[in-house]
Image (spheres, helix red, strand yellow):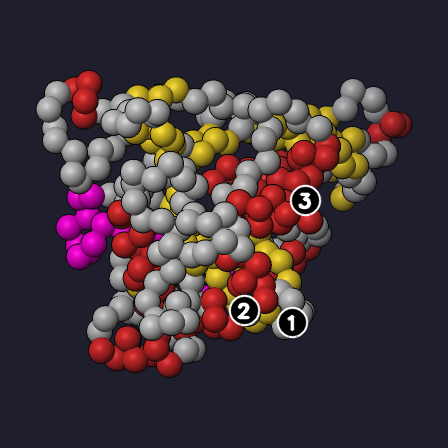
Amino acid sequence: MVSGAPTGHDKALVDHTESLNFSGTTGYRASYAKAVASTKYEQADTPRAFKPEIVVALRKHWARVYDALCINAVSAYNVDLSTTRTTDQIAKVYNPSLAANMEGLAAILNLAGIGTSSCASNLNVNAFFAGEVADGGGPRTNPPADSYDAAKANPEAYAITEESIGWLYTYAWNRGVPPIDLNMNFMSRPPYILLLPSAAIDEFRFTASYRNSVISGDISSKEMWNGIMRMDSVHGVLLAPFDVIYPYSVAGVTYNTLLRTEVCDDSRWIVVEGILLGSQALATDSYDDFEIREANEDDFGRSPKIGYDIIKGTVGIQRVDTDVVTPQMYNNSVSFIFTMRKWS
């Protein structure tokens, strides 16, 4: 995988070698394998086509596995599948809220200055905290050490606000994260997509600041109330629900989302790692499609065994800044840390 790295707005377009940097990233493959047994039914002595029916039934599970790999790749703390593909490593990807994942995420987000807006910084992880600073308001553009622990200890101060989403856009732009499409003529800003649990979007919609912004026309909510619109646009950020919406397939997933979540200290709130995506945020390999195969054994025609395998690798894309003494890597996605009320 080779992709062009977008240049900063302050870079002089001198020639090809100075304007573009290219980097190659190896994509690794992770395998998910299951086996199911189907009981043979006979209707008027007519055998049923089990294979197509099972393909349809397993699509939702298949899609969730892909989602888990993608979110793992762009999270501030991603499980490395390049060196080992053990059951334990796969489980960490499949259930993002395992304690081992949250400990690693907290260790990264508690670093002082991780939210700095300067692209000259050597901090390659992009992370932005919701809410406002206690002394005087404004965005947390340079949060102190132990910021993640502070969100767990004082969750009400880290709830999503209209201002924090607007500043999230500015943060991503200043960090050089490319938006979805710079040629979007029908929008005032080239947009980003922010993945959030549906419950977090609903909670944000019912705040006074959100409703006042809708009335004043500062943010878009066209057809919001009748449920037709799939995503709300807040200052150029599209709020996209990221849920596991099928009740029978949520085993092992916390709070019905594949985003990383953890219960706050007061047990009434949860802290969430939302994901902001622009263009060139991640890539997956395009080979080894979903396959379902019947086992060779007949089992007297009673219960044919069906095996399926999902093999897919996903990697987060990074930019390379060679205009420094030591070349630096910068992620093309942003972790948006916020809190929401706990749903039981």
Q: Which residues are the magenta region? A: 182-201
Which quadrant would the N terminus be assigned to in this image? top left
In space, the residues marked 1 and 2 are separated at their CA atoms by: 9 Å
The answer to if 198 sits in the magenta stretch is yes
Q: Tell me if I can see residue 256 in this picture.
A: no
Q: What residue type is disc 3 on?
A: Ala
Which sits earlier in the primary sequence, circle 2 or circle 3?
3
Mark 2, residue position:
155
Q: Residue at image x 62%, y 49%?
A: 102
Q: How many marks?
A: 3
Find residue 100 and name its label. 3
Q: Secondary structure at mark 2?
A: helix
Residue 193 appears left or right of 253: left
Quadrant for residue 89, please give it.
top right
CB within 8 Å, label 1 to label 2 = yes
Residue 239 appears left or right of 107: left
Mark 1, residue position:
266
Front in this rendered view, residue 59 or 267: 267
Front in this rendered view, residue 201 or 340: 340
